[in-house]
Image (cartoon, rainbow, N blue to C red):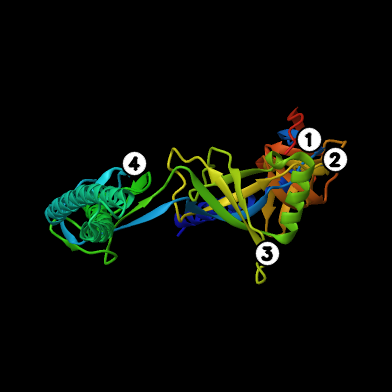
Amino acid sequence: MRVLKPIVIGVVLLALVAVGWIVRGLVPYEQAAGSKSGPAMAGRGAAPQVVTATVGEASLKPPSKYVGHVEAIQDAELYAQVSGTIKKVHFKEGAMVNQGDLLYTIDPDRYSAKVELYEATLSQAKASLNAAKANLESVEAQLTYAEQYLKRLSNAGARSVVQADVDKAKSAVRQYKAAQQEAKAKIEQLKAQVKQSEADLKVARIDLDYTQVRSPITGRIGKAEVTAGDYVSPGAVMMARVVQVDPVRVRFAISDRDYLDLLKISKREGIEAIKARLVLPNGDAFKGEGALDFVGNRMNLNTGTIVIRLRYDNSGGELVPNSYVKVFMETPETERSVVLPQEAVMTDQKGEYVFVVTDKGVAQQRYVKLGDSVDGKRIVISGLKAGETVVVQGLQRVRPGQPVKTAGNAAGAAGEDRQS
């Protein structure tokens, strides 16, 4: 028992030392230092280095935001114009096609035969017409001779002319006149036949041309809805669709108030002063400026909006018809706003706040009410005024009421004027 007693005492002492270290670890370093040295120790080496910026003013107006619908300027559905069997498909699905490119061939044999038939019918009608014209010329020549003969008999006098010859000459004149009228009627009839044959031939040639289905526009073709061997007839089944992809239009609706603002600006500074930026569905900015293509002529009674369309070059194919994009309408604005850099803003459960550096170099946490973001700057609605200094770098090391050391100032970062 005497041997064990020193061992037990040693174990107890070690346990007490361990508990002391654990308790010390639970007490914050600042608290321990404060209790030991007081306020004099609080600032020793505690001022973090930060980069600041001066809150400024700028002529900014946040762009108006809309949801735009990308539309194809031309969208063609292909249907057969004649009946027949598809002989060949000439395009690759999803490829770009040009206006006039051959897409399908429908069996042309039946239509070629019709063309040959109507060509023969037309030739026969023309031959008959020429024969009728020749017959008319012959009849008119005979009529002229008969009229001249009758005139000679009439001028000869009663003593030298037999009445029977005169009567015979008159009868001949009447017969040739009747034949003349008949020949003229025949010619008109044959002319109508020629026109009918020409029309039949024209239709037959059109039908033959329709056996070659060509693209009516330049664009991207979709899926082949019919393939070789399928039977098609006019209007029955859509064969394929061609969609124009460059250029395209972006359609969106703006409120009556925004419309009046745009109208005022366009009258003052010209329509070219109104700019529109697009943001693609993946968040990337579309490179390219749109040109105003259409403005509606009346407001929608239900929504109080009016339709606007912008036209965009789309050689890269980023704008896909029937997709949606974000539209940011930028307009010139002369009103000045208080602004600060976006990187100065932090957020917690209470809202957005910044660290303002006082004249004495102390960081003060201040909650602010902010508006839209424009080119990396936030518009200040309340909580800050121009000329104040805010921390923009080193925020993670700053605590409220703590002195800070300014390592640099992002001069002009918050207050450069910008003309929209």
- Mark 1 burial class by Cα count in 10 Å: few <14, some 14-19, many 20+: many
The answer to whether residue 13 of the structure is visible from this angle is no
113, above or below 340, in the image: below
Amino acid type at image mark 1: Gly
- Mark 2 burial class by Cα count in 10 Å: few <14, some 14-19, many 20+: some
Residue 190 placement (x, y as % from top left): 23, 56
Say if mark 3 contacts mark 1, CB within 8 Å.
no
Depth check, front residue: 152 or 309: 152
Q: Is label 1 or label 4 in front?
A: 4
Q: Earlier in the sequence, mark 1 or mark 4?
A: 4
Depth check, front residue: 190 or 379: 190
Amino acid type at image mark 2: Ala
In the picture of the structure, the residue carrying the numbered disc 4 is 98
Say if mark 2 contacts mark 1, CB within 8 Å.
yes
At mark 2, the secondary structure is: loop
Say if mark 4 contacts mark 2, CB within 8 Å.
no
Instruction: State the residue lying farthest toward the right.
Output: 359
- Mark 3 burial class by Cα count in 10 Å: few <14, some 14-19, many 20+: some
Q: Earlier in the sequence, mark 3 or mark 1?
A: 3
Work out how far the residue at label 3 is from the one at label 2, CA to CA, in angstroms: 41 Å
Image quarter hosting the C terminus: top right
In the figure, residue 101 lies in which quadrant? top left
Q: Earlier in the sequence, mark 4 or mark 2?
A: 4
At mark 3, the secondary structure is: loop
Work out how far the residue at label 4 is from the one at label 2, CA to CA, in angstroms: 59 Å
Image quarter hosting the N terminus: bottom left
At mark 4, the secondary structure is: loop
Residue 299's mark? 3
In the picture of the structure, the residue carrying the numbered disc 2 is 386
Q: Is label 3 or label 1 in front?
A: 3
Residue 406 placement (x, y as % from top left): 76, 30
Amino acid type at image mark 4: Asn
